[in-house]
């Protein structure tokens, strides 16, 4: 990634996710990555885990968020943290967007589609 510290709202291409939603990488370095996810009502982010620490901000909508078997309903302006290795997933209760930050960056998100 070019060393530009500023990212504009329209930058970054949306791409489909394996679970049927879409995401765009906002910005990243080796240590940190910010990704925006968009969901239609009823869309789900499959339950999964990864070694990255994740923090997420509900930018729009409402979500049922499950972390390590506990589910909470979160609304616009709420946030959550997923420690490394814990199973987690979301379900969009309305059309919405999440802004996720990962440390370190998600190298798997940088692979070209089809890899």
Image (cartoon, rainbow, N blue to C red):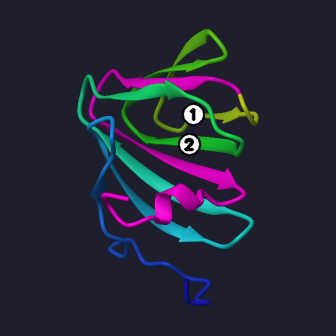
Q: Secondary structure at mark 1?
A: loop
Horizontal and vertical percent position of residue 103? 72, 54
Give the residue at x 70% y 46%.
52
Give the residue at x 62% y 84%.
5
Q: Is residue 68 left or right of residue 13?
A: right
Locate residue 41: give its quadrant. Answer: top left
Q: Circle 2 sits on which residue?
A: 57
Residue 38 in the image: above or below residue 65: below
Answer yes or no: do the residues labelled 1 and 2 have beta carbons within 8 Å? yes
Q: Considering the image in quadrants, where does the N terminus appear?
A: bottom right
Q: Is residue 88 magenta?
A: yes
Q: Circle 1 sits on which residue?
A: 78
Locate residue 57: give its quadrant. Answer: top right
Horizontal and vertical percent position of residue 67? 63, 20
Q: Is residue 58 left or right of residue 68?
A: left
> Among all residues in the image, which is located at the extreme bottom?
3
The mark found on residue 61 in the picture is none
Residue 5 in the image: above or below residue 58: below
The mark tally for this picture is 2
Mark 2 surroundings within 10 Å by alpha-carbon count, few (fewer than 14), some (14 through 19), many (20 or more) = some
Give the residue at x 56% y 11%.
71
Tell me the distance, in whole angstroms, between the alpha carbons under discs 1 and 2. Answer: 6 Å
Q: Considering the image in quadrants, where does the C terminus appear?
A: bottom left
Question: In this picture, which residue range is highlighted in magenta?
Answer: 86-115
Residue 95 in the image: above or below residue 52: above
Locate residue 66: give its quadrant. Answer: top right
Q: Secondary structure at mark 2?
A: strand
Q: Is residue 50 left or right of residue 98?
A: right
């Amino acid at each position: 990634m070019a060393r530009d510290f500023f990212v504009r709202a329209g930058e970054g291409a949306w791409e489909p996710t394996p679970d049927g939603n879409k995401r765009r990488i906002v910005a990243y370095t080796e240590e940190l990555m910010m990704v925006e996810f968009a969901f239609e009502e009823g869309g789900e982010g499959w339950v999964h885990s990864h070694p990255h620490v994740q923090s997420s901000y509900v930018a729009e909508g409402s979500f049922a968020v499950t972390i390590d078997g506990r589910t909470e309903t979160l609304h616009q302006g709420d946030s959550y943290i997923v420690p490394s290795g814990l199973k987690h997933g979301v379900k969009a209760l309305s059309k919405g967007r999440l802004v996720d930050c990962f440390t370190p960056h998600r190298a798997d998100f940088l692979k070209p589609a089809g890899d």
